[in-house]
């Protein structure tokens, strides 16, 4: 019996379609350059939002209607959710998914029972993957919901809590490996502090690095060759989170000898919480060859928290896809809809409207970004703007083959520099012209 009886498998009908259950831009097999849209975009659905997010907020109860869910935390209920999720993946045509261990399987009375619960649900996921061809983009461990993690997981002041977190990571990593996941994510929602009065920051950072090293070691041991990822976010739920933005994460990875093992999973709303644009965060990660994957959502400029809204801003999706194209594609990463419906959009079919909108917004962004790349005007402008470094004194500066003495002499010998315009508005017009199509 279908769980979304009124929803068909979503098809591409083109920009003129008025069917709310159709794509206007996302046409999986359509080629953009040398790849299909499906290959470029690698969409993933988040198990936690699709199956577990009741849409409560700090002031109100859950509103989401989930007729398939008995509301209990039983293993049977967890197993019953699995086919519902795969029906959602089939009908939305989303090829990948992501999960936290605790989204898919409940805590047991003991840690051993918790791990057994996970194994049973992983059996069910494995069977569904085989049947449907859907794939796991990445797995992760939820090290932030349970009260034992209220003071941190890897950064807890308690070594026993660290051991609990490590045990969870071991099993979540093994589950990810079994399901053929392309990656494994660490997001440290509680890896930070509320006050420095009770915090030994240096020790906590050392411990966080230790957990990541242990995970890398264990991956080698079990033969998991997927990509490890860190997901930056500056705050919420902690007042200050150590993995606050791309630059902070890169510095941390470098300092602890982890950069060769990790890339970043960048989330749009986390970038804005950090006071950056998503484009900025992407540029920082790309500069270190460390952009691994994307959690595709957006924030709300009127609200200062993580609203996790579905991406619908075409300017933003174009900016993101321009950089994905520039780096040559997402390789093992994807565009994971770490996004939830508004609390008012509580009916099951809203799950589809939300994902259709996000997929179309990114397909549009891909096409616009490709037009911008093909036109080459922005790249040419950039190349010309920095051309003084291509030869002469500029090339010496770039290769550090000069000295302050030489530059002093040089500067005194030339006509004082006159700068051409930065042409921001003209460049914005060029960008917009390609968005108009
Ligand atoms: C929370 C968030 C997480 C991570 C995975 O803001 O983004 O869902 O993506 O733990
Ligand atoms: Co996320």
Image (tube, rainbow, N blue to C red):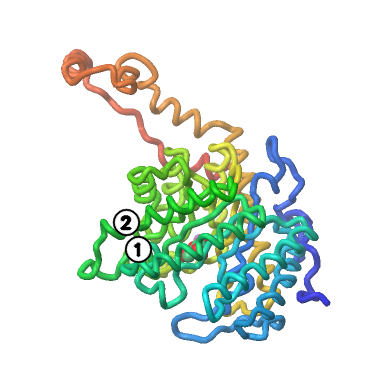
Q: Is residue 298 visible?
A: no
Describe residue 205's horizontal placement relative to residue 287 as left or right.
left
Describe residue 364's horizontal placement relative to residue 263 as left or right.
right
Residue under the image location 73 percent in, 41 percent down: 31
Crowding around mark 2 (Cα neighbors within 10 Å: few <14, some 14 to 19, many 20+) is: some
Q: Nearer the viewer, residue 241 or 357?
A: 241
Q: Horizontal and vertical percent for residue 229?
A: 49, 51
* Separation (CA) of disc 1 from disc 2: 7 Å
* Image quarter (top left, top right, bottom left or bottom right) of the C terminus: top right
Residue under the image location 62 percent in, 39 percent down: 370
The yes-or-no answer for disc 2 within 8 Å of ligand 1 is no
Residue under the image location 63 percent in, 85 percent down: 71
Describe residue 23's horizontal placement relative to residue 246 as left or right.
right
Q: Provide the secondary structure element on which disc 2 rests.
A: helix
Q: Nearer the viewer, residue 399 or 254?
A: 254
Tell me the quarter of the picture where residue 348 sits: bottom right
Q: Horizontal and vertical percent for residue 338?
A: 55, 63
Q: Which mark is residue 205?
A: 2
Q: Provide the secondary structure element on which disc 1 rests.
A: loop
Q: Is residue 348 visible?
A: yes
Q: Compared with residue 170, is residue 110 higher up or lower down, i.e. above or below?
A: below
Describe residue 345's horizontal placement relative to residue 263 as left or right.
right
Mark 1 and mark 2 in contact? Answer it, CB < 8 Å: yes
Of callouts 1 and 2, the N-terminal one: 1
Q: Which mark is residue 128?
A: none
Residue placed under numbered mark 1 in the picture: 155
Q: Horizontal and vertical percent for residue 28?
A: 74, 50
């Amino acid at each position: 019996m279908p769980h979304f009886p009124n929803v068909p498998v979503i098809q591409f009908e083109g920009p003129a379609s008025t069917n709310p259950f159709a794509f206007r831009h996302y046409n999986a097999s359509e080629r953009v350059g040398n790849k299909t849209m499906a290959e470029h975009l690698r969409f993933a659905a988040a198990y936690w939002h699709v199956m577990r997010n009741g849409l409560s907020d700090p002031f109100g109860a859950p509103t989401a209607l989930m007729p398939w869910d008995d509301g209990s935390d039983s293993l049977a209920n967890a197993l019953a959710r699995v086919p519902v999720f795969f029906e959602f993946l089939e009908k939305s045509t989303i090829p990948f998914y992501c999960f936290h261990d605790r989204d898919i399987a409940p805590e047991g009375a003991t840690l051993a029972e918790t791990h057994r619960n996970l194994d049973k649900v992983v059996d069910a996921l494995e069977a569904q993957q085989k049947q449907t061809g859907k794939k796991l983009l990445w797995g992760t461990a939820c090290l932030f919901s349970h009260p034992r993690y209220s003071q941190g997981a890897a950064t807890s002041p308690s070594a026993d809590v660290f051991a609990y977190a490590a045990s969870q990571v071991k099993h979540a990593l093994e589950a990810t490996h079994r399901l053929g996941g392309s990656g494994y994510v660490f997001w440290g929602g509680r890896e930070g502090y509320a006050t420095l009065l009770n915090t030994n920051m240096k020790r906590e950072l050392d411990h966080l690095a230790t957990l990541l090293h242990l995970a890398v070691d264990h991956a080698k041991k079990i033969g998991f060759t997927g990509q490890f990822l860190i997901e930056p976010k500056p705050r919420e739920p902690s007042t200050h989170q150590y993995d606050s933005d791309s630059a902070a994460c890169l510095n941390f990875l470098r300092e602890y000898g982890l950069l060769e093992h990790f890339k970043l999973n960048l989330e749009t709303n986390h970038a804005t919480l950090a006071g950056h644009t998503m484009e900025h965060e992407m540029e920082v990660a790309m500069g270190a060859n460390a952009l691994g994957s994307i959690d595709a959502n957006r924030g709300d400029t009127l609200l200062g928290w993580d609203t996790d809204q579905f991406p619908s801003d075409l300017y933003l999706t174009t900016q993101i896809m321009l950089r994905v194209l520039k780096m040559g594609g997402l390789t093992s990463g994807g565009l994971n809809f770490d996004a939830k419906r508004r609390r008012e959009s509580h009916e099951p079919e809203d799950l589809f409207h939300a994902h259709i909108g996000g997929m179309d917004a990114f397909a549009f962004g891909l096409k616009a970004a490709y037009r911008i790349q093909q036109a080459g005007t922005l790249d040419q402008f950039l190349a010309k703007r920095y051309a003084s470094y291509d030869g002469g004194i500029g090339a010496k500066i770039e290769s550090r083959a000069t000295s302050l003495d030489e530059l002093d002499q040089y500067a005194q010998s030339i006509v004082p520099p006159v700068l051409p315009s930065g042409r921001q508005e003209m460049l914005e017009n060029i960008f917009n012209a390609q968005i108009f199509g």
